[in-house]
Structure formats: C-alpha cells, structure tokens
Image (cartoon, rainbow, N blue to C red):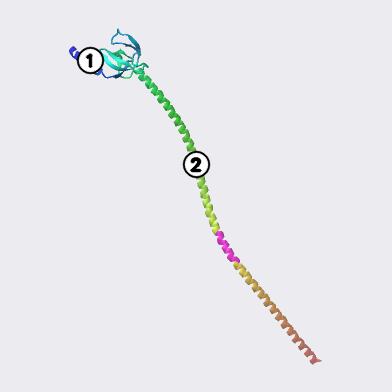
C-alpha cells in the first residue's frame, strides 16, 4: 500500500515537473496574506505579503514551492517563490464574490435603466392610447358628419331634381295658361262683337217695326177721318 502511494506521488511529481515549463495562471488561496519569498525555502527573504486573490503566473515548480510572477502588481518582472499549497486554479471566493457583486450592481443598474425605460414606454404607450382613442372618436364623428352630408347631398339632389321637374311643369302650365288667356280674350272680344251686332240688329228691327207700325196707324186714321 505504501509502495503504491509512493508510486502515485512520484507520478504526480513527474507530471508536475513535466508541466512546470508551461506558464499557467493561478491565484493565492483563500487566506488573508501569504509570504512571497525570493527563493524556494523558508530561509529565503520575504519580498512581500501577497493578499488573497492575487493573480499570479506560474513559471516553474520545485518541490513544495512554485516560481511565480505577480500579475497586475504595478511593478515590472516581480518574480518570487510561494508554497504550492497556497495556490489554487479557481478564482478565490472573495474575488469571485466581489466580481459577482460588481456584476450584480451592474445588472441592478441595467435593471433600473430598463425599469425607467419601461415606465417611460408605459407612459408613452398610455399617451399614444389616449391619442388613439381621441383619433378614433374624431374618426367616428367625421364618419357621422360624412354620412349626414351624404344624406343631405342625396336629399339636395332629389330636391333639385324635383324642383327642376316642377319648374318645367310650371313653365309649361304658364305657357298653356297664357295661350288659354289669349284664346279667352279673343273669345270674349268675339262674343262682345257678336252681342254688339245682335243688339244693333235688334235696335234696327225695332226701329223698322216702329216705322211700319207708325205708317199703319196713320193710314187707319186717314181712313176713319
């Protein structure tokens, strides 16, 4: 069992040694601060204290130590050694929490903007709905006015046709009346002349009869005398 564990440990060591030539990214483990030394032993000088979540570039490994370079430290070529057990490949919880918090704040800000846009859109939608209702009411009113105007126009055309027909009939009747009046005047004039002639004849006949009667009376008197 011990020999098996030793073999497994040696295989892991060789794998680490084989891959140590490749630069990998790692982070300081979830601790407050970790010593960053000038060499791979506790006797080497402490260069600085690395905070939890510090991003590092793994350059090499040697036993329990890793040769790393500090990323984003503001310095150039800051290399040193750190115990490999203090390195993790995942993002530290504290840094992840800060990133998630920043992301959450960003999302909250976006959500607030979206909510403001939604409110503005809702207000604009209400205004547009009100204008739409007003437009529909105006359209209905115009439609009623159009229908009334259409009916009025049809009535006007009917009245105009009726007026034209009645005017033509009136003109014809006026012409007939004028013709009848003229004819009646002629008949009256002829009747008057006829009555005048008849009266004249009656007077003439009466005058002749009077003359005859007078002569007859004078003869009778002369006979008796």
Kindly give the residue lying farthest to the front in the view shown: 76
Identify whether 92 is placed above or below 42.
below
* Magenta segment boundaries in residue numbering: 162-174
Pick whichever of labels 1 and 2 is earlier in the sequence.
1
Say how many tags the image has. Answer: 2
Does the image show residue 84?
no
- Quarter of the image where the N terminus is located: top left
- Quarter of the image where the C terminus is located: bottom right
Magenta span: chief secondary structure: helix
In the picture, measured across the screen, residue 184 lies left or right of residue 149, that is right
Q: x%, y% of residue 103?
A: 38, 23
The reply to whether the magenta stretch includes residue 114 is: no
Of tags 1 and 2, which is closer to the observer?
A: 1
- Residue carrying label 2: 135
Crowdedness of circle 1 by 10 Å Cα count: few (<14), some, many (20+)? some
Residue 168 position by quadrant: bottom right
Residue 160 position by quadrant: bottom right
Kindly give the residue lying farthest to the top in the view shown: 43
Q: x%, y% of residue 153?
A: 53, 53
The local secondary structure at tag 1 comes to: helix
Residue 31 numbered mark, or none: none
In the picture, measured across the screen, residue 138 lies left or right of residue 68, that is right
Determine the CA span between mark 1 and mark 2. Answer: 82 Å
Q: Nearer the viewer, residue 149 or 93?
A: 93
Q: Nearer the viewer, residue 156 or 117?
A: 117
The local secondary structure at tag 2 comes to: helix
Residue for point 28% across, 17% down: 59
Does the image show residue 127?
yes
Q: x%, y% of residue 17?
A: 23, 16
- Residue carrying label 1: 13
């Amino acid at each position: 069992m011990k020999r098996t564990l030793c073999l497994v440990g040696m295989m892991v060591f060789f794998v680490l040694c084989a891959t140590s030539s490749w630069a990998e990214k790692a982070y300081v483990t979830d601790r407050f601060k970790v010593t960053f030394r000038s060499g791979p032993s506790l006797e080497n000088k402490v260069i600085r204290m690395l905070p939890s979540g510090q991003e590092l570039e793994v350059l090499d490994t040697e036993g329990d130590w890793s040769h790393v370079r500090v990323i984003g430290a503001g310095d150039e070529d800051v290399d040193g050694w750190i115990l490999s057990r203090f390195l993790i490949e995942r993002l530290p919880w504290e840094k992840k929490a800060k990133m998630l918090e920043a992301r959450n704040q960003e999302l909250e800000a976006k959500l607030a903007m979206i909510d403001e846009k939604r409110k503005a859109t809702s207000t604009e939608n209400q205004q547009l709905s009100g204008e739409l209702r007003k437009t529909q009411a105006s359209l209905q009113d115009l439609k009623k006015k159009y229908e009334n105007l259409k009916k009025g126009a049809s009535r006007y055309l009917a009245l105009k046709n009726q007026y034209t027909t009645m005017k033509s009939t009136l003109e014809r009747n006026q012409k007939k009346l004028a013709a009848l009046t003229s004819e009646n005047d002629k008949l009256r004039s002829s009747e008057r002349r006829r009555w005048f002639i008849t009266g004249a004849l009656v007077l003439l006949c009466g005058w002749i009869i009077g003359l005859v009667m007078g002569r007859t009376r004078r003869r009778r008197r002369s006979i008796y005398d």
